[in-house]
Image (cartoon, coloured by chain):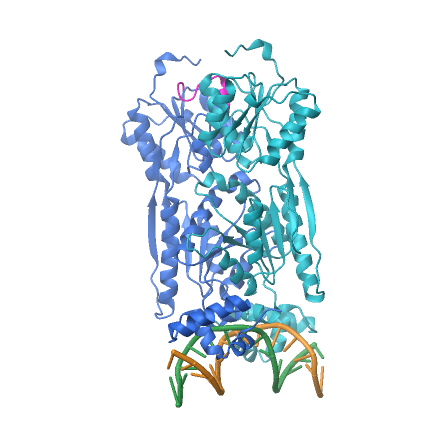
Chain colours: A cyan, B blue, C orange, D green
Amino acid sequence: MALDIKSFSQSIGVSTATVSRAFSGNGRISEATKERILEEAKKAGFSPNIHARRLNMKKTGLIGLYYTFADEPIFDYYIMELAQELIKAAEMRDYAIHLELGGSAKGKDVDRLAELTRGHGLDGIILVVDGRSSGLKLLKAVHDCPAAVISGMPWTPVGDEIAIELDIRSGIHEAVKELAKLGHSRIGFIRGTADEGKLAAYKEALEELGLIVDPRLIAKGPLSFADGRNAFNQLAAHSPTAVICSTDVLALGALNEAQRLGIRVPEDTSIVGMDDLAFSAFTTPSLSSIGIPRQQMAKTAVDCLLARFDMGKNLGRRASSKHVINTFFVPRSSVCKNETKKNSIN
Amino acid sequence: MALDIKSFSQSIGVSTATVSRAFSGNGRISEATKERILEEAKKAGFSPNIHARRLNMKKTGLIGLYYTFADEPIFDYYIMELAQELIKAAEMRDYAIHLELGGSAKGKDVDRLAELTRGHGLDGIILVVDGRSSGLKLLKAVHDCPAAVISGMPWTPVGDEIAIELDIRSGIHEAVKELAKLGHSRIGFIRGTADEGKLAAYKEALEELGLIVDPRLIAKGPLSFADGRNAFNQLAAHSPTAVICSTDVLALGALNEAQRLGIRVPEDTSIVGMDDLAFSAFTTPSLSSIGIPRQQMAKTAVDCLLARFDMGKNLGRRASSKHVINTFFVPRSSVCKNETKKNSIN
DNA sequence: CTGAAAGCGCTTACAG
DNA sequence: CTGAAAGCGCTTACAG
């Protein structure tokens, strides 16, 4: 049914080599015959078999993206929004992203990663990791394939992987500073999972500004909407005028609980989320957050990976590289000047 | 660097055929040698070249998903949440999803689809279409590859494609009925793009219940958060007690405008969105919506596609098939009983 | 159950 | 610029 290069080339009276050249753009071929061949191919409905092609060219045009879905879609927004930018960044380079899901649902987990990379299924692989040890495990499974690690916490390269480290702390510093500027001094914090860096940044920022770190203004989420509600409820007893949450989802919970308690946001309490997911701009009030330059991250990952892939053909040794991506405060209506005198919670 | 089957098989003293059998599971091979080979492979770091494999087996283990990203991520939540379910459904069958982006950014658009499908890059392709004509264009580009069309509006198969039609009307009927049960009679509607079906369902449902269709209670979004705000503002002048919106994003806008106008949701006006995106459960108030059985849709698409792929090897002619997926009302706190006597908007 | 060999559909030195 | 031929790394009849 599907035409192959042999019969197609015969049917138009040229060699397979010539047809191949017309499609690949490699090798010398006259413009005229190239155009003619491409046109005939369209007419006849011929496209080169992609696998035979990749087998020969040792290039797939594919970059893998490996991560593990959460159970609830809301927790996957983060990776989905990142994936979108990666897809776009890859497209600019005529590459596609191959989504590869982690999770040991079938006990395979990391094996699949080894198979894919060693089997030449990918020209590069992006690992989105959520911790050092799990990240190392993944990285160890990758063979014969340039790898980039995207990490929300500090990542020191262990091998020749490209490290892309999101510096969430810079954004937190900025947020705290802005809040202080708006007259807030009782700034609370709702913790997430594996958030030592975030917490430390929050404390540091307060101290730099000469504000006191009050442990009663720190509550543990760590994850869900309900967690955010509970945590905010705890904090409310100690009248923070602003609360920073480790994720946007926690912030949604905080927003909800505030409303239930009759605490107005932002008039009584300002609320700030983290990650600036797309929906955050469209809540009521719109949620302030810590923004992530996703496009920059994606471009860095893709470009570095492809650079390494191209190098890999020539050079032997490859050095690791590390890129730190700064975050920033995104103020929206969930934040305003502190006018705390006016309200009298408990 | 990377081991191939020839040197690997030599190194452990068997033929390439035997190694191949150990990996593929096809052909007769003793358990003992199979296990031994797999173990040795792990030790030596051998994985079969995936392209050589696919070239021979005429099977890729890949299902394509084709659609076009919007400019703003918020409008891609719909497809992202669907993609997630497709990925999971594919995984159950040991398949992966290959995301292929549409958009004529490079004027290629549909050509790429032809290349991919004709070049044996995929075992099946899922087209998420948003209109008849664009859907037909895509479908026409697909060759030599089983295709499934997922459509938010009625889709009559034109060829042998699998049609998966989302019946949003059933959910709208349910929502209107529930609202009526709650005492609402002035139920407004905010229109979306290409929403004739939705609008018709809304009108039908009202009429079935003996309620009057008031054109002043119908406003046009059609798309963005800001559109939702504007539309709600228009409707507010005519005091609907409930408003159904063509998308969740429009509903978020409506929610926002209601708050700005001092209209309480749901006490003064109930609001219902459509598509039930994951974030809708976590707004304040939580957004009622029309739910989509995404998992079912995904499973249907993947299973039908793979069934057809397997058939394709044997049979010639293939019949089209059509699957209608019902939607349903998801009540949340943005909806309550109509107590309209209490409020007196203009 | 296992091996030797042909073949999957391309690409790319190698000649010309 | 073009063609004949070897080769990419597997799989699968075909023998045994």
Give the quarter of the figure containing the N terminus of chain A.
bottom left
Residue B341 location in percent, x, y?
35, 13
Foreground: A218 or C11?
A218
Residue B199 location in percent, x, y?
39, 35
- Segment tinted magenta in the rendering: B257-268
The answer to whether any part of residue B234 appears in the image is no
In the rendered view, does A174 fall on the left or right side of B42?
right
Foreground: A1 or A246?
A246
Residue displayed at 40% across by 52% down? B89
Where is residue B6, by image quadrant? bottom right
- Residue B217 colored magenta? no
Q: Is B174 above or below relative to A128? A: above
Foreground: A41 or B57?
B57
Residue displayed at 67% across by 34% down? A170
- Residue B267 colored magenta? yes
In the rendered view, does A236 fall on the left or right side of B295?
right
Where is residue A56, by image quadrant? bottom right
The answer to whether any part of residue A166 appears in the image is yes
Residue A325 location in percent, x, y?
67, 42
